[in-house]
Image (cartoon, helix red, strand yellow):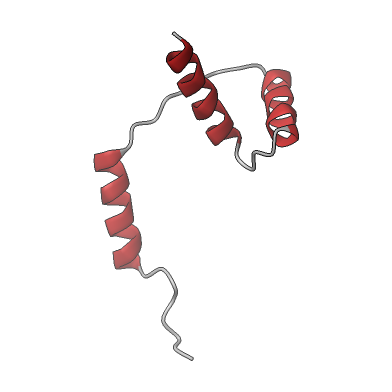
Amino acid sequence: MSDTPKNSEARLKANAKWNKNNYVQINLPVFKNTKEEWKKESEKLGYTSLNQFIKDAIKEKIERG
């Protein structure tokens, strides 16, 4: 087995560069209890990620018009 780390510094740097060029952060301030409520509801619906739940909800709203 190799002693080389799974994610080398070069890989982390390349990933950070790719993320910077391809993603944008959206800051959505909400009250703490709101975040916890959304998280519980997303888990009930089978989501493992609150982020994905929010993105799907927005996409669904756009599709409905």
Q: In which quadrant of the rendered view does residue 12 lie?
A: bottom left
Counting labels gives 0
Residue 62 spot, x, y in % from top left: 43, 15
Q: In which quadrant of the rendered view does residue 53 lie?
A: top right
Q: Is residue 12 above or below residue 51?
A: below
Residue 55 spot, x, y in % from top left: 49, 28
Q: Residue at x 44, y 88 (%)?
A: 2
Residue 30 spot, x, y in % from top left: 60, 17
Q: Is residue 14 above or below residue 17?
A: below
Q: Residue at x 60, y 39 (%)?
A: 49
Q: Residue furthest top?
A: 65
The quadrant in which the C terminus is found is top left
Q: In which quadrant of the rendered view does residue 13 lie?
A: bottom left
Q: Is residue 10 above or below residue 28?
A: below
Residue 63 spot, x, y in % from top left: 44, 17
Q: Residue furthest front?
A: 64
Q: Residue furthest bottom?
A: 1
Q: Is residue 46 above or below residue 40?
A: below
From the viewer's side, name the closer residue of 35 and 44: 44
* Residue 38 in the figure: left or right of residue 49: right
